[in-house]
Image: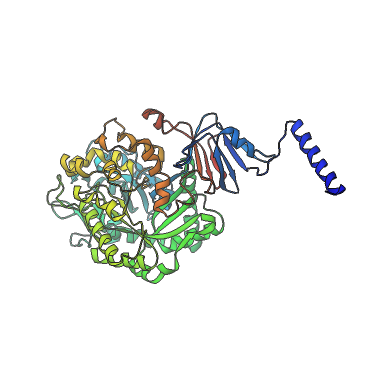
Amino acid sequence: MNFKNILTTVFSLTILIFIQSCGGKVVKNPADLILINGIVATLDEINPTAEAVAIKDGKIFAAGSTSEIENYHGNNTQVIDLNGKFVMPGFNDSHAHFLGIGNSKQILDLHGAKNWDEVIAIVAKAVESSKPGDWIIGRGWHQEKFNPKPMPNVNGYPVHNELSKASPNNPVMLTHASGHAVFANAKAMQIAGINRSTANPDGGTIVRDSLGNAIGVFEENAENLIRKGYNEFLAKRTPEQILANYEEQVKLASDDCLKKGITSCADAGETFEIIDVLKKLADEKKLAVRLNVMVGDSIAAMQKKLKDYLLIGYGNNSLTVRSVKQYIDGALGSRGAWMLEPYLDLPDHVGSNVTPIDELKKIAELALDNGFQMRIHAIGDRGNREVLNIYEEIFQKHFDKKDLRWCIEHAQHLSAQDIPRFAQLGVIAAMQSVHCTSDMGFVAERLGAKRAEEGAYVWKKLINSGATICNGTDAPVEDVDPIACFYSAVTRKNTEGKVFYGDQKMTRLEALKSYTINGAYASFEENIKGSIQPGKLADLVVLSNDLLKCSDDDIKSTKVMYTIVGGKILYSSK
């Protein structure tokens, strides 16, 4: 060693001794952010628990004890002392309508209306501040939750007369909580040209009274008769106004999701037009929540455009488009779910097949040919069986295609013989636990106790058969809040404390996986998100309570303290 090298070595050692004598330390890889003194559920099977997490360059750098993670504390490292708070991977809502969440903040919210009179009062108040001819739009009513029941009614639905009196000069369109029916007043029906001779469209029903008059309710594809007039009204806006409205919806949805701990969302069906807007926002770094968007457009549009819209991890993993969303039936609340046997409370009705089987097969082939995952909405037991049949036929025809991860969205009501088919075919059940506790008050009325016990929201039967379940809320059908949904998953209790077939509860760990790593798997993203492991995206949520160990009641009171996306704190309760 020459003299120069000796001097360099001595100088380095002197500096090191000086730093250490002053209480400092050498940090080779300082983190950008460290979380210490917490309870960390990593969802990593090799290292399932930790006390602290280090984050660097938007990714998980390390997870371990507080003393280990403090080794990454550099001069510019931000430190959050969790004081025993709970850390987990960010919630991944596997089925929501992202822009719909934003839109629900722009229109009348009817979820809290206890009866039809309250709905009318909300509309009447909106009329006061509206110009004649403006459309009044709302969402969230549910006839099964009205107390008292509306009178007169048809199949439990109210009749439009009082609503029409409250809004004679403004067309009104109020979407059912499920999204599978709308209520229109006389003005809206006049614009749509609805009369006694108007025929039911394929896959839809105009609900009528005993004299054949439309009462104002339009189920499934019949919604489009009313929506056509509203869409023509919207088309009068300038392109700039249309874009600004979409951007506002994205901002409102993002703010709501981040406040509730959601870092990723599978957006269950958007048109190519809206996907273009989302891509623009990704380019502008304006997507705060990571989106996995399902294409929900017409078969004609997909035949022209689908091949050009495959996006995986676009915009620094803010936008993925690799799946197609379709519908085979409707919802249970509107009796649109396609059942093998008639509804108990409407014996001449088995629900609706809203998209023909042959068309769904063509779309499935189109998806497969272009490298897209297939995700079909099916709620009734007949709907689920038919989708499983379609998938099985496609899989057998294309046996060389592997790891397709096709999904059934909702999978709410299953025949016992179809439950094991999910695991056998490798089909993912994208379910929403909160639907169970929200709907349980009328499930037995619709199906009867035997069918309800056999196949309604049978999470545990599916898990025990080897199927993968991913969880979500179907927002804005339900609130996007994952805490309430998690509570439903592990208790199956409604707001009155009643339990719906408790043997189908998920364990705490199963429920946590359904909302994190399983959702990532359903999106082909389990290698970059869904667990707290080095190299994965630093998408985390800090909660006030330990969801794996706290009491059931404490789950309900759990608060989101921080939501972190890509290593950045995008929401803080402080």
Vertical relation: 490 (above or below) 130: above
Q: State left or right for residue 352 relative to residue 270.
A: left
Q: Can you tell which quarter of the image residue 461 is in?
A: top left
Which residue is at 28% across, 52% downward? 422
Instruction: Give the quadrant of residue 74.
Output: top right
Residue furthest out toward the right? 3
Q: Is residue 104 visible?
A: no
Instruction: Give coordinates of residue 413: x percent, y percent.
Output: 23, 47
Q: Nearer the viewer, residue 443 or 38?
A: 38
Q: How many marks?
A: 0
Residue in the foreground of this view, choosing between 4 and 493: 4
Q: How is the image coloured?
A: rainbow
Q: Is residue 132 above or below residue 434?
A: below
Q: Residue furthest front?
A: 1
The image shows residue 206 at horizontal and vertical percentages of 21, 56
Q: Nearer the viewer, residue 53 or 293?
A: 53
Asked if residue 279 can be seen in this view, the reply is yes
Please tell me which residue is depicted at 47% across the width and 43% down the height of the picture: 90
**Relative side of 368 to 565, left or right:** left
Q: Is residue 191 above or below residue 51?
A: below
Q: Residue at x 37, y 58 (%)?
A: 403
User: Is 444 situated left or right of 115 in this image?
Assistant: left
Question: Residue 352's spot in the image, x, y percent?
Answer: 21, 56
Assign the C terminus to one quadrant of the image: top right
Q: x and y percent of residue 367 in the render?
A: 36, 65
